């Protein structure tokens, strides 16, 4: 048991991944830019290891309760996970998982005979059924962009008992929202590009493993494939991680206020935010998550109205991606690969840490313009 295990996540985020307290030691691990190291040590070469990667991996690992590994992007982390199963594996994934993850699974279906079974993860019985005979179960909750909530505890346990490798994409919830390794997941995946780095200025991915065997396999593989993160990105993401809980708290507060007001507006339909008392995922989220997060999905009558809404805002930026300090939104079906089961008029909103009344005033003006 590490001394960090006794601390709350808020404290771990601040104290983990630091140099030892010794006179003149810097408080933070410095950014180490090195392609090679003087021979005779553990690191040897820049593809094998880097002290700045390690600091980030230690801190994220401590927060998720496992051992971390950084990758150049979230999708690179997914690619690494796919190497833990055979090329012709059967994979279960949410039908509304992150578009890029589904794209990767589809591409591997074409190249390597990977079979993907897409499920509605909010439907536990159907998801467990699909897990029979699966090699890999990739879960995401809340889903991107539909904001559905899965019964993660039940699904992780059931999928594990059925013999699958269980991976949870925890990008939306963050380790402050839920800790899937405690629920029986084998590996947690993050697009650290989003909430962890948190400032829309870096791309980074990560895996956190519950089992040493998986970590070792992945670490060996990372040396071989050369799919390695940049030290500067790890440094930025660790800097972001230090304040993740404060940003997440503020953004979740803002999201709760805005979701309720959007839900009451006649132009908005089917507002999905797990914190809304009448949201289909509310009871599950309330029982299992520490926060409801800061992502909202709202539907307009059609694509034109949704686009007009996005175009009419001033503070809110129309942009893809999410999890930054700034509020962003986009109509998801503007991406040709987005699932046809996502409504044409669905706008996904990533609520930032600005003043909530300024954010609402901007949205209210945009709603007036299009109504
Ligand atoms: C963005 C995202 C990813 C992919 O991460 P990148 O850093 O963009 O490669 C994976 N999962 C979810 C839920 C995401 O939002």
Image (tube, grey):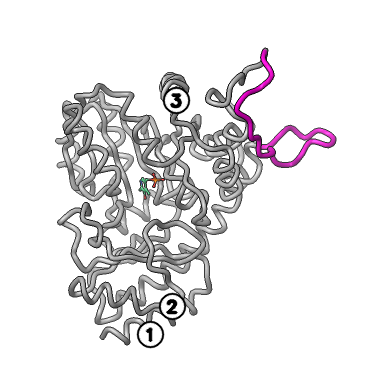
Which residue lies at the image location 79% right of the left edge and 36% below the top edge? Answer: 25
Asked whether 130 or 240 is in front, the reply is 240
| Dot placed on the residue nearer the N-terminal end, 3 or 2 | 3
- Residue 13 occupies quadrant: top right
Query: How far apart are the alpha carbons under marks 3 and 2?
Result: 43 Å
Q: Position of residue 197 (x, y in %)?
A: 52, 50
Query: How far apart are the alpha carbons under marks 1 and 2?
Result: 9 Å
Quickly name the residue at label 3: 222
Q: Are marks 1 and 2 in contact (CB under 8 Å)?
A: yes
Q: Residues within 10 Å of mark 1 (few under 14, many from 20)?
A: some
Quickly name the residue at label 1: 365
The label on residue 314 is 2
Q: Nearer the viewer, mark 1 or mark 2?
A: 2
Question: Is 361 colored magenta in this rendering?
Answer: no
Asked if disc 2 is less than 8 Å from ligand 1, the answer is no
| Dot placed on the residue nearer the N-terminal end, 3 or 1 | 3
């Amino acid at each position: 048991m590490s001394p960090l295990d006794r601390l709350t996540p808020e404290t771990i985020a601040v104290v983990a991944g630091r140099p030892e307290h010794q006179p003149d030691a810097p408080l933070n691990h410095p950014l180490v830019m090195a392609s090679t190291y003087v021979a005779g040590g553990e690191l040897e070469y820049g593809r094998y290891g880097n002290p700045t990667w390690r600091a980030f991996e230690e801190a994220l690992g401590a927060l998720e309760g496992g051992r971390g590994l950084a990758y150049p992007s979230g999708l690179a982390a997914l690619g690494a996970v796919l190497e833990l199963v055979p090329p012709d594996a059967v994979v279960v994934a949410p039908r509304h998982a992150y578009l890029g993850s589904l794209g990767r699974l589809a591409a591997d279906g074409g190249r390597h005979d990977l079979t993907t079974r897409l499920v509605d993860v909010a439907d536990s019985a159907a998801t467990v059924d699909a897990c029979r005979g699966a090699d890999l179960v990739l879960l995401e909750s809340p889903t991107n962009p539909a904001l559905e909530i899965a019964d993660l505890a039940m699904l992780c346990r059931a999928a594990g008992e059925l013999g699958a490798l269980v991976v949870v994409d925890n990008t939306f919830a963050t380790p402050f929202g839920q800790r899937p390794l405690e629920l029986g997941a084998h590996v947690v995946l993050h697009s650290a590009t989003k909430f962890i780095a948190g400032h829309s200025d870096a791309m980074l991915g990560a895996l956190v493993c519950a089992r040493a065997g998986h970590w070792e396999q992945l670490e060996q593989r990372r040396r071989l494939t050369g799919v390695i993160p940049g030290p500067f990105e790890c440094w930025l993401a660790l800097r972001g991680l230090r304040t993740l809980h404060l940003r997440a708290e503020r953004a979740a507060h803002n999201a709760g206020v805005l979701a309720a007001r959007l839900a009451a507006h006649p132009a908005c339909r089917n507002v999905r935010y797990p914190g809304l008392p009448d949201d289909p995922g509310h009871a599950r989220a309330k029982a299992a998550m520490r926060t409801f997060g800061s992502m909202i999905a709202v539907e307009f009558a059609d694509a034109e109205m949704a686009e007009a809404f996005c175009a009419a805002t001033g503070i809110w930026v129309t942009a893809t991606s999410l999890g930054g300090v700034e509020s962003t939104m986009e109509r998801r079906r503007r991406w040709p690969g987005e699932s046809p089961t996502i409504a044409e008029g669905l706008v996904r909103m990533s609520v930032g840490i600005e003043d909530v009344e300024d954010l609402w005033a901007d949205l209210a003006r945009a709603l007036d313009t299009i109504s």
